[in-house]
Each structure stands twice: as C-alpha cells, then as structure tokens.
Amino acid sequence: MEWCVSVPKIELHAHLNGSIRDSTLLDLARALGDKGLIDFSQVEHVILKRLSPIYTHFCVLKLEFDYGYLNTDNRSLSEVFKLFDLIHIVTTDHSSITRITKEVVEDFASENVVYLELRTTPKKNDSLGMSKRSYVEAVLEGLRAVSSVDVAFIPNSEEPVNLSSTLLSDASDKCNGNTRKKIFVRLLLSIDRRETTEAAMETVMLALEMRRFGVVGIDLSGNPAVGEWITYLPALMFARQQGLYVTLHCGEVSNSKEIHNMLDFLPQRIGHACFFEEEHWRKLKSSNIPVEICLTSNIRTLSVPTIDAHHFVDLYNAKHPLVLCTDDSGVFSTSLSNEYKIAASTFGLGQKEMFELSKNSIEFIFADDVVKEVLRKTFDSAAKSLTL
Ligand code: 6MZ
C-alpha cells in the first residue's frame, strides 16, 4: 500500500459528491439536524455505512427514503443512487460545495495524485439562490481555497493559484528548499440521466463558458436505469462540435442497444463497461476507446460478480487503453492508491507494471500536450526514486 501511495497517479473518474469525506458529510448533516431540517440520528447511520440489515425508512425534508434492506458492504446500484439523493440534500449549498471541492483535491493530492479530472453535476436550487452557474463558481472557489498543495487549473497559464512557480517544472516544485506538491485539476460537468434535453444543453453551454477556468468536458452519468440515450444526444453532439471532450458512463447495466449507440458516438473515454457482450467488446477494441476502470465501485454495486472475473484482466491483456479510477472514494471507502493495490494483489501486477499503468494514463487525459509533457517529466523523475 505504501508503494501504491508513493507512486504518482492520475485520477480521471471521480464524482465530486461521491468523493466527500465521511467526517464532512457528518458535519454538514449535523448542522442541518441542529436547524431541525433533518433527523440527524437517522441520517448518521446511513452515512457511517453501519446500517445493520434492518428495514430502514425515513423522511428528510419531505423526501421519503426507503432504504429497504440496505447492505453496508455491497450497495446495489439502485441503493447507491438513493444514497446520492441523501448526500445531495446535505451538501447542495454554495459553501458546502466549496468545502467539499477543497477537501477532495487535498485528499487526492495527499496520496500523490498529480493530475485530477473531477466531475460534478451542476445543480439548481431556487430556495438557496443556486443556479448551475453559481454551483460551478462554488466549485472553482473550492479550487482556489486549497492551501496545502499548489493547484494548477487554469489552462494556458498553469500557474498554481497559491504560488507562482514555473510552468514547466514537474509536479512537485522545489520552493525555498522545500518540496511542495502540485496537482493539475480539470473539471468535467456531468449531465444527470434524469435531466431533459434542455437541461443537458444548459450544462454544455455552461461548460463552454467555463472553459477558461479549466472545464474541459462533459460526462453523462446518473442512474443508468433511468432515461434514454436520445435525450442527451443533441447536447453531447453540440459539446463535441464545440471542442469539449466527452466521456460516457456506458454499460453499467445491461442495455445492448444503448451500449452500441454510445460506442458508435465515439466518446473520447467511457466509464465502467460492466455489462458488455461479445459484440460490444469487439466494437470497443476496434475503436480503441479508453476505459475508466472502477474496481471497488463495480464490486460494491454488484455490477461484476467477483473481482477475479473483472473485465480489467481481458482489457489489460489485450493492451486496450485503460485507467484505474475511484468513482466515489467517499461512498465506497476507497482511494486511488487502494485501487492500485487491489489491481496488484488480484491480478498479479508487479511494481513496474503498476508504474507503467499509471504513467500510461497520461495519454488519456483531457488536457493539452504541455500538461502531458510536464506529467511525463514528473513520472520520469519519480521512477528514479521508486524501486521498480
Ligand atoms: C453513474 C454516478 C455514479 O455529480 O453530485 N454518479 N453515476 N454511476 C455511478 N457509479 C456508482 N457515481 C456517481 O456526484 C454524485 C453524482 O455522480 C453520479 C450520480 O449522478 C450522482 O448523483 P455529483 O458531484
């Protein structure tokens, strides 16, 4: 594990609210409890993932939560989305979003993630005066608030916001003799599968407007049992025409037609690919679309039967482009280092293979060649100090 923490890593599939610390979620829930807006004792159980398999039903802000027999270790996909509804009630105000963003960036940086693509669904909440734009501004505020590490998120400048250092230095600058960590952060705006075509288009327009602040692309996510591909297609096509990168949650449930349609769209990356059939694998491999692999998430949501049977093995052996990711490090109690550790122990990868896997992820990031070159330099200098 120590080695997995020390190796530089690239995170390309992390949902902001899914990456929240348990302690922060508890803090925020407690504050709402103190205001009488939720019953904290009920929510606390769910947050701490300590629910015994007893039937749970409760009400938060007039929203009914019927968790049924929520299993603490393996949360089926539908249970996970109920949990997200609860998380959103607790987190969706400007200052909370700013705090979560700051902490998530700090957490990834602390385990030597040197490039992070953070995705989040812009939300509107009239009662809090929140628009999709003000939501994203709160995220940007969180990036500016990070103080423990230098964050570079503005393309074309790449100046870390807290420290002026040279652009082409590697990801851990020497400053006054001290080594300060540096992390590149890029944002993807997510379209939730519950949204309408118009709402999806609004998110794309916002992404275009926010490009100068490091928004580089669009993600399609949300409960895969909800919604139709055709609803988001106009917005996704427009995003691509305008030069935004697109990544899709693809094959999280069995839906052959949708998987074909998504692969035909040729997104720059896809996430998950758990319910692929022979024809889908063939199409994926011939199009060479990189896959964001989320091992713990797939196991916890019961999307793959066992870790040994995970499609990572086949894709890795076929040298198909892939990248290890966390998905929702808070919800699934994992970290990127832990995902590398699981890959090593389950699939027998040695340190050299793990290093190459991590370094190779540079090729699939949604950033320009300058950033890629800085990252290659970072990995090359790390290789000298790591035992490979
Ligand atoms: C699909 C997921 C997801 O956007 O509020 N999300 N969508 N599959 C998954 N696998 C388990 N994990 C997270 O972060 C939370 C939102 O990300 C999406 C869901 O829409 C969830 O509500 P943000 O920051």
Image (cartoon, rainbow, N blue to C red):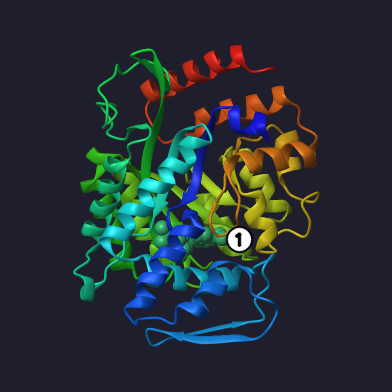
Side of 8 relative to 179 (left or right): right
Percent coordinates x, y for residue 132 in the rendering: 25, 61
- Write down the residue under mark 1: 252
Q: Residue furthest left?
A: 129
Percent coordinates x, y for residue 380 in the rendering: 54, 14
**Residue at left offset 68%, top offset 48%:** 281
Q: Using the image as rendered, state which of residue 141 and residue 372 is in the foreground.
A: 141
Q: Confirm whether residue 51 shows in the render.
A: yes
**Residue at left offset 52%, top offset 71%:** 83
Side of 222 relative to 311 (left or right): left
Q: Using the image as rendered, state which of residue 345 and residue 199 is in the foreground.
A: 345
Percent coordinates x, y for residue 152 in the rendering: 32, 31
The quadrant in which residue 332 appears is bottom right
Residue 149 position (above or below residue 98):
above
Side of 101 relative to 225 (left or right): left
Helix, strand or loop for disc 1: loop
Percent coordinates x, y for residue 243 in the rendering: 32, 40
| Quadrant including the N terminus | top right
